[in-house]
């Protein structure tokens, strides 16, 4: 099957070999070198949305890619589109999808669609990943080890973004992909990312609002987003992943409805330091969150490489001592039995020799 790129087409599904849409006559092969064919939409196709995202076939390489299509011609949306293109182009090998091409498609009615062709990550977003895990083994939470690994990778991605004066503004499970083979995470959807300028730190100026239920920081909902707003969303994301429960469905503190009560829903987490870090990331007040990504990475490293408690070492030493004692005892028993067997064999040989001598 192939899919028509025209958002107003009445019948967008076409035969996989079609060169033009049977319904509207627009081209089915995209880009001036005849490079791409849309195969299916990803997510719901909604005419009210500014974007549509498709899986597409690269006809020259016979591989699958992703094409993101901007339908709107509003200046604000075009600005976001150009910004996402710039981020994907300039931040190569930083845990983001690789940008392949940016191109335009002009429809028969003159409407211009702006397109980004990018790498198709071989994996699922973390929202899909949780759903599949639940269906497979009825578990809907990530492990503590997975949380530490993915949280560190996300902090490293944000570290590079923030160092270059960008922040994402829409971190949530559906915007984080995990690769099937390497288990590496990839941050996607940079249409709402923003540069850190005087605008975002000046309380008298506005910042375009971006809102995702359960994940958006309180100051961002008031159009006062800052880089630490990403930390709040990151903390909420990992509270969701560790509990398997959407933040909107978790109980909140009676003193502050922006504070989640989640620890008892994640019994697999034994590290108090990890719990404290996630709580700090989700602090409603910006000045109570970690100051920067380097602080987050330092705390994660301390969690990963924390010294083994003395009580554990003593217990381990006792266990090793018992094991050595058992091995020594077993070796002694083996030696003793070997001697007894040798003695029995010698006695038997002696009796046989005497018997043969008497018989002769």
Image (tube, rainbow, N blue to C red):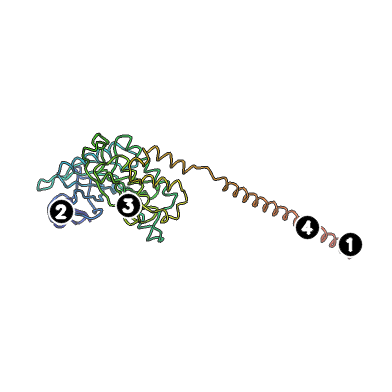
Image x and y of residue 299, in percent: 43, 41
Please give left or right for residue 342 compared with residue 180 in the image. right
Q: Which mark is residue 357?
A: 1
Q: Residue furthest front?
A: 255
Q: Are marks 2 and 1 in contact (CB under 8 Å)?
A: no
Question: Residue under circle 3?
Answer: 257
Q: Are marks 1 and 4 in contact (CB under 8 Å)?
A: no
Element at badge 4?
Answer: helix
Q: Are marks 1 and 3 in contact (CB under 8 Å)?
A: no
Q: Earlier in the sequence, mark 4 or mark 2?
A: 2
Q: Nearer the viewer, residue 25 or 288?
A: 288
**Which mark is nearer the camera, 1 or 4?**
4
Please give left or right for residue 337 compared with residue 57 in the image. right
**Which mark is nearer the camera, 4 or 3?**
3
Q: Nearer the viewer, residue 114 or 26?
A: 114
Q: Earlier in the sequence, mark 1 or mark 3?
A: 3
Quarter of the figure with the C terminus: bottom right
Residue located 34% across and 43% down the image: 231
Question: Residue under circle 2?
Answer: 21
**Spatial CA span between label 4 and label 3:** 77 Å
Q: Residue furthest bottom?
A: 359
Q: Residues within 10 Å of mark 3 (few under 14, many from 20)?
A: few
Q: Earlier in the sequence, mark 2 or mark 1?
A: 2
Q: Earlier in the sequence, mark 1 or mark 4?
A: 4
Image x and y of residue 149, in percent: 42, 46
Element at badge 1?
Answer: helix
Question: Residue under circle 4?
Answer: 340
């Amino acid at each position: 099957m192939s899919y028509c790129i025209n958002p107003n087409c009445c019948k967008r599904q076409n035969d996989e070999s079609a060169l033009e849409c049977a319904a509207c006559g627009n081209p089915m092969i995209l880009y001036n070198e005849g490079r791409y064919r849309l195969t299916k939409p990803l997510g719901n196709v909604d005419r009210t949305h500014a974007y549509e995202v498709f899986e597409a076939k690269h006809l020259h390489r016979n591989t699958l890619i992703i094409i993101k299509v901007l339908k709107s011609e509003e200046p604000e949306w075009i600005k976001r589109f150009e910004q996402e293109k710039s981020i994907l182009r300039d931040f190569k090998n930083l845990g983001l999808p690789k940008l392949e091409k940016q191109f335009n498609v002009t429809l028969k009615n003159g409407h211009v669609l702006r397109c980004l062709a990018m790498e198709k990550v071989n994996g699922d977003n973390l929202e899909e990943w949780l759903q599949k895990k639940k269906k497979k083994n009825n578990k809907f939470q990530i492990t503590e080890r997975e949380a530490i690994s993915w949280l560190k990778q996300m902090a490293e991605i944000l570290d590079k973004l923030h160092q270059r004066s960008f922040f994402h503004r829409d971190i949530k499970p559906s915007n984080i992909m995990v690769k099937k083979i390497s288990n590496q995470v990839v941050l996607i959807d940079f249409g709402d990312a923003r540069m850190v300028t005087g605008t975002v730190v000046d309380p008298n100026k506005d910042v375009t609002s971006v809102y995702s239920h359960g994940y958006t920081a309180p100051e961002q909902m008031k159009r006062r987003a800052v880089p630490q707003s990403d930390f709040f969303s990151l903390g909420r994301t990992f509270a969701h992943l560790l509990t398997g429960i959407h933040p909107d469905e978790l109980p909140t503190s009676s003193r502050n409805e922006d504070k989640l009560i989640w620890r008892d829903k994640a019994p697999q987490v034994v590290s108090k330091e990890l719990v404290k870090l996630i709580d700090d990331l989700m602090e409603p007040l910006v000045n109570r969150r970690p100051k920067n990504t380097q602080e987050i990475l330092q705390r994660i490293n301390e969690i990963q490489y924390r010294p083994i408690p003395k009580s554990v070492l003593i217990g381990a030493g006792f266990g090793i001592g018992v094991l050595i004692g058992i091995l020594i005892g077993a070796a002694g028993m083996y030696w003793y039995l070997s001697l007894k067997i040798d003695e029995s064999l010698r006695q038997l040989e002696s009796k046989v020799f005497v018997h043969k001598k008497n018989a002769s």
